Image (spheres, grey):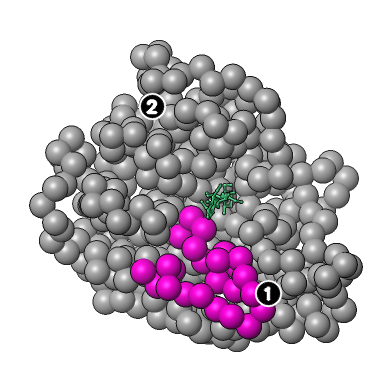
Amino acid sequence: MRMSSSIASIGIGIVGSLCTPAPLPADETPAAAQVKLREQVGDRLLIGAAIDARMLDNPAYANLVATQYNSITAGNEMKPDALQKVKGTFTFDRADRMVDFAQKNKMAVVGHTLLWHSQCPKWLFEDESGKPLSREEALENLRTHITTVVKHFKGRVIGWDVVNEALSDAPNEYLRDTPARRAIGDDYIIQAFRFAHEADPDVELYYNDYNIEADYKLPKAVRLIQELQAANVRLDGIGIQGHWLIAHPEMAELERGFAVLAATGVKLMVTEVDVDPLPRRRAGADVNASEAGQNPYLDKLPPEVDAALAKRYGQLFDLMVKYANEGKLSRITLWGVDDGTSWLNDWPVRGRTNHALLFDRQHKPKAAFFAVSKSLSAIKP
Ligand code: G3I
């Protein structure tokens, strides 16, 4: 299967041992201990979670991550504003800590992200008055950032989300209007991929975005993939973020989107899965958006909503497992570990009590966890 090349390139000596994590401190969460997703999938699939470096100080959290997942993504610690907030000053300590944790527990690390319009320091592409830098200056800043970061993590990160969320959500607009694009031009995406490949020819390179499997954005995603392929840049994977709701998008739309994206020949990865059970108007994950809304489930989900969430997770994982079994999908990553630390507690409505992940606030596995586990049991040897 194609995913094995991804696993083989992890570069931290874990080939053949993804299902045997290092011994952990004794306080493993008892309820979660019985089923371990990483043991279920072995080396046939990367199953991961986005984690928060500060949370690694919590042994229960660290244990849960290390026992359930064979890969991690940094939720925030590898973004440009975390690594080079001030021009020329790189701060790798928190990200390094995560990588050390992953290596100790025989987990792969996905780099997220070299370039995104959010969490990106202004100086990279704008002068002090907010005007775009010259193309040359902006390209030089981008090259320095990408080169330094990619070289720093060389051999310890399997692949990079090189560019994140560059596609526009607007009906008649292809690319999002961003500071990088204003300064460099439409080829900023291609340039970012070239800089990353030059810095580490062995590392995998991905494009990552939300709603690209949805009808309205799918043609733009295909166009971008084809443009990157035509430009001959290295493109190993397309990251479907997977910020979904219980009833939206419908499975038929997702199935269409997966099929069209897989037909481009690029490996699929589902990189930021969560399923929002709370009411909201918008789909996807545009961090610039916000809305007012109710906070209906202050304690836990009512049984019927909990069951609907589990059913939806099962259907989604069935679809992903199908693609994994066909050798077209190599990784599934949850965007967070437990409901208490999910970004959906603050988006698109601030300060809600959300329940979108597999583990509750006490790290107990929810019905959704067992639905996912059931789907993963169909992964072929
Ligand atoms: O680090 C500061 C902390 O010092 C301060 O006390 C605190 C006060 O609010 O804020 C902290 O920063 C927050 C940061 O997460 C780290 O926790 C920011 O306010 C908050 O906006 C930021 O949110 C992150 C979001 O990206 C920002 O755009 C989420 O954690 C992160 O999960 C989310 O991840 C994105 C992916 O990268 C791309 N796809 C969408 C996904 C969800 O938005």
Asked whether 338 or 1 is in front, the reply is: 338
Which residue is at a point 78% across and 78% down the rendered structure image? Answer: 138
Asked whether 67 or 362 is in front, the reply is: 362
Secondary-structure class at tag 2:
helix
Which residue is at a point 48% across and 55% down the rendered structure image? Answer: 75
User: In the visual, does 49 lie left or right of 127?
Assistant: left
Decide if ligand 1 comes within 8 Å of the CB at mark 2.
no
User: In the visual, does 250 lie left or right of 203?
Assistant: right
Whether 62 is among the magenta residues is no
The x, y position of residue 234, in whole percent, is 60, 75
Q: Crowding near pointer 1: few (<14 within 10 Å), some, many (20+)?
A: many
Secondary-structure class at tag 1:
helix
Q: Is residue 109 above or below residue 350?
A: below
- Quadrant containing the C terminus is bottom left
Which residue is at a point 76% across and 44% down the rendered structure image? Answer: 169
Q: Is residue 343 above or below residue 77?
A: above
Q: Quadrant of residue 281?
A: top right
Q: Amino acid at mark 2?
A: Ala
2 or 1: tag closer to the N-terminus = 1
User: Mark 2 = which residue?
Assistant: 310
Q: Quadrant of residue 29?
A: top left
Q: Which residues are magenta?
A: 74-97
Q: Amino acid at mark 1?
A: Ala
Q: Is residue 2 visible?
A: no
Q: Crowding near pointer 2: few (<14 within 10 Å), some, many (20+)?
A: many
The x, y position of residue 332, in whole percent, is 43, 50
- Quadrant containing the N terminus is bottom left
Residue 192 image label: 1
